[in-house]
């Protein structure tokens, strides 16, 4: 595995990891609170498989403000990340030739949408791994997050949406800012990111299966989170992210309206192949993906179809170890899903998906399927 820094026009230096030396390029974009190091286990799988490393070149980028990248200018939108990475693509002899499979985990799928909009000719397909969707994710006040922000004096009640970057910081206060310690990060990730692989019990707030706690990748993931300094800007940008043409609105308890305007960037996806992969959300059993709701993926499939993309959705069953963090702790299966997608012009079928994740472990919603898609906004 190789790595190096690249200067981009924003003035930042972006760290790029690479594994493999093949002619088929794949770019990996990590989720929020992560750098490209989140894909280290997957890149090691690439390096260790002769057939993969000779066919593909995998790249993983550190966001400005994470890993080994600089953070001189705080971001305002996810497009700021995308423009940094577009400069990296233009600077690399292989990447600037195009034919790229672009893969985004969580927030990374939002950044991927911005990259496609900047230059759709570069990309042959896009993969969302538990992605934030075409309409972003909302920062909503609930539980202990409600209350009065002592700095702004503004009160936020149950169900209110964040209306400023300060509000996002206040909503996230239980594990960011002064509370950003290895212990609080571990507690949060055990609870909602690694909940299924750890078989987390929210009633007693304890891990049911500690095996993954002893995997080197677990501590590496938590250490990576501690390198990120782009929060709360990144979550604010994800909150106000919306690739559709429509504005999403919500009225807060004080009568004010929070509006998330549409950017209308999805036309760039016309004719593009897209694969959406996510673990189903099962809040009752506290299993599956507890960060990204199923409705976000359903909305995304609808929006991309309407834009003219060819979209297949793979929903992994909850309770079998797949959660929001599955690209981190299931690197081999994630790699196989990406290469299977890249190597076919057709859709991935149920049999092929089951050969990767196990029999009966996933439901595949084909491109032509419409009943599962969701037009009305239902995500958060």
Image: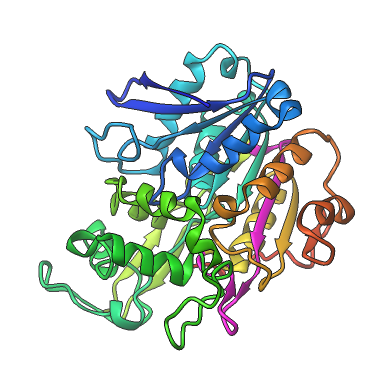
Determine if the magenta segment contains residue 270: yes
Closest to the observer, 283 or 332: 332
Determine if the magenta segment contains residue 115: no
Residue 171 higher or lower than 65, as above or below: below
Q: Quick check: 188 left or right of 231? A: right
The structure residue drawn at horizontal position 25% and vertical position 40%, both measured from the top left corner, is: 74
Q: Is residue 48 shown to the viewer in this render?
A: yes
Q: Which residues are magenta?
A: 269-291
Q: Quick check: 35 left or right of 300? A: left
Q: How many marks?
A: 0
Closest to the observer, 128 or 193: 193
Closest to the observer, 77 or 352: 352
- Percent x, y of residue 240: 39, 54
Q: Quick check: 30 left or right of 10? A: right
Residue 345 higher or lower than 93, as above or below: below
What residue occupies the far top of the structure in this picture? 93
Residue 338 higher or lower than 303, as above or below: above
- Percent x, y of residue 307: 67, 45
The structure residue drawn at horizontal position 73% and vertical position 55%, both measured from the top left corner, is: 313
The structure residue drawn at horizontal position 37% and vertical position 36%, both measured from the top left corner, is: 80
- Percent x, y of residue 220: 42, 49
The structure residue drawn at horizontal position 37% and vertical position 21%, both measured from the top left corner, is: 5
- Percent x, y of residue 15: 39, 28
Q: How is the image coloured?
A: rainbow
What residue occupies the far bottom of the structure in this picture? 203
Q: Is residue 163 shown to the viewer in this render?
A: no
């Amino acid at each position: 595995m190789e790595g190096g820094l690249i200067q981009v026009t924003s003035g930042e230096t972006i760290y790029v990891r690479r594994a493999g030396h093949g002619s088929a390029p794949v770019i990996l974009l990590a989720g929020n609170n992560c750098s490209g190091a989140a894909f280290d286990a997957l890149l090691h799988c690439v390096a260790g498989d002769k057939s993969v490393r000779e066919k593909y070149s995998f790249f993983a980028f550190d966001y400005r403000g994470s890993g080994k990248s600089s953070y001189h200018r705080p971001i305002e939108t996810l497009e700021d990340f995308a423009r940094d990475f577009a400069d990296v693509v233009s600077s690399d002899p292989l990447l600037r030739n195009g034919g790229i499979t672009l893969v985004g985990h969580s927030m990374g799928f939002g950044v991927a949408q911005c990259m496609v909009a900047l230059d759709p000719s570069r990309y042959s397909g896009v993969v969302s791994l538990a992605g934030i969707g075409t309409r972003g994710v909302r920062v909503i006040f609930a539980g202990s997050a409600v209350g009065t922000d002592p700095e702004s004096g503004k009160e936020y009640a149950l169900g209110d949406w964040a209306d400023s970057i300060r509000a996002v910081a206040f909503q996230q206060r239980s594990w960011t800012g002064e509370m950003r310690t290895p212990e609080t990060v571990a507690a949060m990730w055990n609870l909602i990111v690694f909940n299924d692989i750890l078989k987390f019990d929210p009633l007693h707030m304890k891990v049911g299966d500690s095996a993954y706690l002893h995997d080197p990748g677990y501590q590496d993931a938590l250490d990576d989170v501690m390198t990120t300094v782009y929060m709360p800007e990144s979550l604010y940008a994800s909150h106000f992210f919306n690739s559709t043409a429509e504005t999403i609105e919500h009225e807060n308890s004080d009568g004010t309206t929070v509006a998330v305007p549409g950017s209308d960037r999805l036309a760039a996806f016309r004719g593009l192949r897209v694969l959406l992969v996510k673990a189903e959300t099962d809040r009752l059993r506290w299993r599956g993906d507890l960060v990204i709701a199923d409705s976000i993926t359903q909305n995304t499939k609808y929006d991309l179809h309407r834009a003219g993309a060819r979209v297949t959705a793979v929903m992994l069953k909850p309770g079998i170890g797949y959660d929001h963090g599955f690209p981190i702790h299931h690197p081999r299966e994630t790699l196989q899903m990406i290469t299977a997608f890249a190597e076919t012009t057709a859709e991935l079928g149920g049999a092929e998906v089951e050969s990767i994740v196990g029999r009966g472990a996933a439901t595949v919603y084909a491109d032509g399927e419409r009943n599962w898609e969701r037009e009305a906004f239902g995500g958060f």
